[in-house]
Image (cartoon, helix red, strand yellow):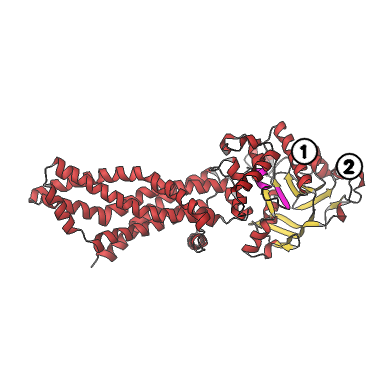
């Protein structure tokens, strides 16, 4: 391949990327920048909250429990060497609130709900359901995309809080029930160490940013899928890969902004 | 127009009104459309008469479905004008286009039923979205439409529980739920067994007559289409190659038309996709 071809290929890739960003932006704008329909939109939103949020709870809660337990066990083994095992509570809680809660929840959400969103919308496109909405004079962005977007944005921060709460409980099980750390010390030091603004609000901000990004990527990949089995398969994979990378990269940026000083 | 008109006399079929005297609902003038470098239509002009069943026929891949999407405003032509009831579809803004689409509906090849709703809710969907009718009235309208297509008993079934023919009929009930002026049928007979095909043929004709619908049927099922259409356009080579009543088309001596209507595998439309010389390719030589 000649140098000119390589430059042309690079240019084409750059143009495609910018075009994709523009399309994704227009899709999101078309979906959310409209007057909400309370009477007809609320049932759609509730249904999606159930599908995206409630049905993701099992994997989030089970993962949170085990991650909290592993974190506590590893933390205990390190802290006990310094005689500071009483600090296990804040170590588990701060790790979960500041990093693992929002990040792992977003990664699990991308795998569980994001891929399902892409596949569902991709199949709706390939079976002409989106076209039929258009022909019925019903905007698919408002009918299909908007409720799923808002459901993702509402669900993920709540799921991250549940993940964190269950993780702390898992840490308590290992630290207090198994390893014998004093329960009063565990909870009191934890309570004294966790700050509302610095830890809990930042946890929610991170989750909210991840929710927007993961849901947006999933919806965009589904809405602009090539409507055949290979296209849907590729779009689903792209959703998980791109969402995961975006979450990890954004996590660094947000952490630097929140805790970098 | 470059195509061959066969519609000089419509009396042969015993029609009550010659087609050229019927006010057109859809007018397509000098339409050109291409996908990338592949030209689909080049200077196509045709009119769809109001209140009649008009068939658009042609070989697979000729762009018949594309034509319906152009009429519905889902695709934009490179040039040319498409008017529905005098309104230029592609000069409408989004709200004007949606207002126009409320007056038309489309039966998709796949049926395109919403898979998360049962048959009743599928048919009721557009009514609930576009009207504030009480649920009791919507229920009656939906049951009437389902009765018309013979699926009142399947109202509570999910689309996945229906056969292909039943899905098409349910989609037909949904398409006529808002009593549109224009119904676009995209390959309604594709993949249907003879009984389902017969049912659909009967339904399209009877519903068109009963509701005074203007129907556009895109299909390559020659006998079924010629059996119900009032007027037929045949597309090939990016253009309309012939048009007329079914009787006129059957009597025509256009070789391409005869090949298509007779279902002959080879002729002016070749059996082989263009390729290099067979013998040379088998011997590994290049042209």
**Magenta stretch, residue numbers:** B171-184
**Tag 1 and tag 2 share a subunit:** yes
Q: Is residue A148 left or right of residue B145?
A: left
Residue nearest the observer in this picture, A194 or A228: A194
Residue B142 x %, y %: 64, 44
**According to the image, label 1 marks what residue?**
B224
Furthest residue to the left?
Answer: A83
Residue at disc 1, secondary structure: helix
Q: Quadrant of residue A154?
A: bottom left
The answer to whether one can see residue A249 in this image is yes
Q: Is residue B182 magenta?
A: yes
Taking the spot 75% from the left edge, 45% from the top edge, the residue there is B58
Q: Quadrant of the N terminus of chain B?
A: bottom right
**B86 over B195 or under it: above or below:** below
Residue at disc 2, secondary structure: helix
Bin the neighbour count of mark 1 within 10 Å (Cα to Cα): few under 14, some 14-19, many 20 and up. Answer: some
Between the C-alphas of marks 1 and 2, the distance is 17 Å
The answer to whether one can see residue B62 in this image is no
For residue B251, the mark is: 2
Report the chain holding disc 1. B
Residue B164 x %, y %: 63, 36
Q: Is residue A159 magenta?
A: no
């Amino acid at each position: 391949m000649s140098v000119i071809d390589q430059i042309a290929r690079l240019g084409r890739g750059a143009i495609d990327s910018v075009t994709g960003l523009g399309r994704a932006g227009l899709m999101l704008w078309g979906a959310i920048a409209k007057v909400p329909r309370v009477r007809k939109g609320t049932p759609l939103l509730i249904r999606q909250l159930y599908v995206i949020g409630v049905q993701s709870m099992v994997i989030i809660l089970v993962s949170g429990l085990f991650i909290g337990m592993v974190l506590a066990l590893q933390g205990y083994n390190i802290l006990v060497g310094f005689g500071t095992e009483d600090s296990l509570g804040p170590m588990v809680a701060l790790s979960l609130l500041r990093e693992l809660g929002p990040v792992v929840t977003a990664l699990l959400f991308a795998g569980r709900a994001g891929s399902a969103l892409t596949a569902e919308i991709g199949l709706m496109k390939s079976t002409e359901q989106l076209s039929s909405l258009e022909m019925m004079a019903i905007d698919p962005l408002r009918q299909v995309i908007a409720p799923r977007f808002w459901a993702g944005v509402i669900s993920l921060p709540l799921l991250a809080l549940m993940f964190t709460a269950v993780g702390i409980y898992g840490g308590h099980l290992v630290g207090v029930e198994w390893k014998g750390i004093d329960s009063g010390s565990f909870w009191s030091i934890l309570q004294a160490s966790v700050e509302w603004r610095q830890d809990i609000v930042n946890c929610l901000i991170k989750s909210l940013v991840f929710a927007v990004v993961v849901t947006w990527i999933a919806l965009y990949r589904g809405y602009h899928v090539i409507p055949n089995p290979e296209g849907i398969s590729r779009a689903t994979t792209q959703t998980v890969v791109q969402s995961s990378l975006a979450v990890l990269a954004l996590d660094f940026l947000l952490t630097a902004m929140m805790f970098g000083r | 127009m470059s195509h061959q008109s066969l519609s000089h006399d419509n009396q042969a079929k015993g029609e009550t009104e010659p087609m050229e005297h019927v006010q057109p609902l859809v007018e397509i003038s000098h339409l050109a459309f291409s996908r990338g470098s592949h030209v689909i239509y080049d200077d196509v002009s045709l009119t769809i008469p109001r209140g009649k069943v008009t068939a658009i026929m042609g070989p697979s891949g000729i762009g018949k479905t594309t034509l319906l999407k152009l009429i519905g405003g889902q695709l934009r032509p490179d040039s040319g004008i498409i008017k529905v009831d005098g309104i230029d579809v592609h000069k409408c803004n989004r709200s004007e286009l949606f207002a126009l689409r409320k007056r038309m509906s489309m039966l998709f090849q796949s049926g395109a039923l919403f898979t998360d709703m049962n048959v009743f809710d599928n048919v009721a969907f557009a009514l609930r979205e576009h009207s504030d009718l009480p649920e009791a009235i919507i229920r009656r309208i939906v049951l009437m439409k389902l009765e018309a297509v013979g699926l009142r008993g399947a109202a509570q079934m999910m689309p996945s529980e229906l056969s292909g023919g039943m899905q098409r009929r349910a989609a037909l009930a949904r398409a006529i739920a808002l009593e549109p002026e224009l119904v676009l049928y995209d390959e309604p007979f594709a993949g249907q067994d003879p009984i389902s095909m017969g049912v659909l043929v009967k339904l399209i004709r009877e519903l068109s007559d009963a509701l005074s619908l203007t129907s556009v049927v895109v299909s390559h099922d020659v006998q079924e289409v010629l059996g119900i259409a009032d007027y037929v356009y045949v597309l090939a080579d990016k253009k309309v190659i012939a048009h007329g009543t079914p009787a006129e088309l059957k009597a025509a001596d256009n070789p391409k038309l005869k090949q298509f209507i007779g279902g002959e595998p080879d002729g002016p439309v070749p059996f082989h996709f263009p390729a290099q010389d067979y013998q040379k390719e088998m011997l590994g030589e290049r042209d």
